[in-house]
Image (cartoon, rainbow, N blue to C red):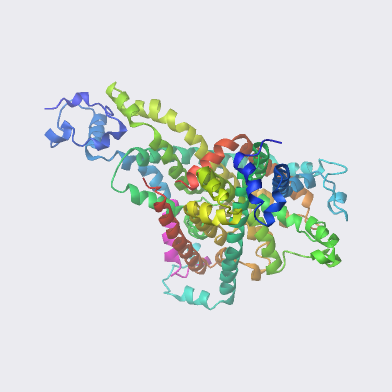
Amino acid sequence: MVNTDKRRPGTSSPAGAASKNLPVKATQGRIRTPGLTPRQRVAIWIRRHGVAPYLLLLPATAIIAWLVLWPSIQIGLFSFQNYGLAQISGALPTQWIGFSNYTQILHDPEFWLSLRISLLFALVVVPLTLIVGTLVGLLLSRLGKRMATFVSTAALLAWGTPAVSGSVIFAWLVDPDGGIVDWTLSKLPTWLGGGPHWSGFSWENSVLPAYAVLTVLLVWTSYPFVAVTVLAGLRTMPAELLEAARVDGAGPWTSFWKITYPMLRPVFLVLLLLSIIWDFGVFTQPYIITEAPGNRDEFNLGLYEYFRAFTQPPAYGIGSAVAFILTIILLIISVGYVRASVKQGVFR
Amino acid sequence: MTIAQAPAGTRGTQGARRGWGAVFTSKSLRRAILNLLGLLVALLTLFPVLWMISTAFKPATEIYSLTPHPIPLHPTLANFAHVLSGSEIGTPYWNFLKNSLIVTIVSVAASSLLALLAAIALGRFQFRFRTIYLVMLLIVQMLPQQALVIALFIDFRPLNLLDSLTGLVLVYAAFALPVTIWMLRNFAATVPRELEDAAAIDGAGAWTIFSRILLPLISPGLVATSVFAFIFAYNEFVFALTFIGPDTSKFTLPLFVQYFQGHTTGGTDWGAIMAASTLFTIPVLAFFLIIQRRLASGLVAGAVKG
């Protein structure tokens, strides 16, 4: 018999899960040694079967499964049910209604409008964010230390501003009565696109102006992340490479596309995918800027989904169908993100 | 001004060969232009936040003046007094600050503890489903919150978790977990195995190894990751908007700020909104400035390198 008394709970490290070839396992089929406390038995069992990592993962996994994974499955289930006010209050049971929620959405012009708005918005904001962020990142790498700290601190503050605050600030900046943007535009000379017709211009009540404001707002909040990430990437590049290119007469444009970009391509790929996911799924900023549900023509996919579900009388089934479509689109992009991450070797 | 970096210095003479590069013939001119650009970027970036603070201190006559002034001519605390008293919304500002702090602190504590355990499993053990689990974490953090909120609303209703801070704590902890685990895992993985082995040889138990070796070495990472959980919970809007219903006394700060946009009598009271927004934002920004350095490295480590 192995002296199990010495194998008190945790005599081996947490890494002991790997130590399956310990004598305990080799010689004993079952632990029948008398004189062991239940606690010691549990500890031995845990070590023998290598369950320690699973036990450690259990609480976090349970919470994620209950509050994140299960709801995402439920969305799929609800999208095939007639889930509404009567069902949530328990007056009527839910019924499976096949694809009728989906056919209803697909025949709703508002759905297609909101989908188009989300797509176009991502199509404009993502490249703009990446371009501005990269340019500022490159600028930061060339600035002196004090100036670089100043600029990156400013960027950090923009990035750190909560979405709700950023949104109400921009709503105030473009307010028709007293907003600074209209005032500035009305004072600008005509050849710069300014003029008195700008005073009192309402940005929030129609799609294009509202999304123009949202574009600036989203670029403002998300470019710092890109800039800081690009800067960190630039710091990992050997300085000799750019130096050599310069000696050979390459300008900044050429050396960026021939050297910097190819070397940082994985970083750019991750930034691109993250930006698409964030900008396509954006909710808080358009909610506040368009004063939702004020004008339904201004809904993006997220707002459309939310108000289909929660506007009285609630239609959780239809909302879930839109939510499911939104989730699937984002998951497809996420697959690209996961693959890009795998290439970066994050699963070591 | 500080000394320009060496590569930037040599650039001027080389660039001169190219047509447009002739502008950059002099080093100091080049440096001046770069600094000017930096200044412009910084000011444009800071402008919205500065304008918020400035507006918060302006009396109504100046806010709606025909010639806006960058700095309040007659600074006043009236907007803050108005917002702090809560005459409009029913309860004073402190109530919402308290709600936000409760929700944030409890959810951060819970998610940090659970994430710590999970990170040790993922960072220190090799087991069968490890890679699958990591992929799952990466995907889970991409799920759109405004989609899941429908299901959570339905699930929480019979549990009486709507209109309650407990419901928000649960959701915030759950949604912070994937990112927190993901980042902490790196910190857990960097603790040298030899330290554990040495302790085990000296007879240390699992708990001793955890509390004396792993915890002290991971705790800097715990600070960095809890910052993210903290910011997420403090700023979160969608769940709070959906769960916290007509009872305004349960509002968190984001709802409190947003409330003024639609509910002020006689047109939008921008002074009040900007004052509320300032009270909400300044603590976060101050926090960011304090932890700036650690945050920048944690940000990159967590988001890009995994």
Q: Residue at x 48, y 77 (%)?
A: A103
Part of the protein shown in magenta: A65-85
Residue A288 occupies which quadrant of the picture?
bottom right
Q: Residue at x 47, y 53 (%)?
A: A266
Does the magenta segment cover residue B245? no
The image shows residue A162 at horizontal and vertical percentages of: 63, 48
Q: Residue at x 45, y 66 (%)?
A: A78
Q: Is residue B62 left or right of residue A29?
A: right
> Quick one: which residue is furthest to the top in this view?
B202
The image shows residue A115 at horizontal and vertical percentages of: 56, 70
The image shows residue A27 at horizontal and vertical percentages of: 12, 33
Residue B84 occupies which quadrant of the picture?
top right
Closest to the observer, B128 or A290 = B128
Identify whether B215 is placed above or below B225.
above
> Number of labelled discs?
0
Q: Check the picture and name the quadrant holding the N terminus of chain B.
A: top right
> Quick one: which residue is furthest to the bottom in this view?
A107
Closest to the observer, A250 or A289 = A250
Does the magenta segment cover residue A78? yes
The image shows residue B68 at horizontal and vertical percentages of: 85, 52
Closest to the observer, B199 or B169 = B199
Closest to the observer, A287 or B151 = A287
Q: Is residue B166 visible?
A: no
Identify whether A284 is placed above or below B54.
below
Q: Is residue A10 left or right of residue B284?
A: left
Q: Is residue A14 visible?
A: yes
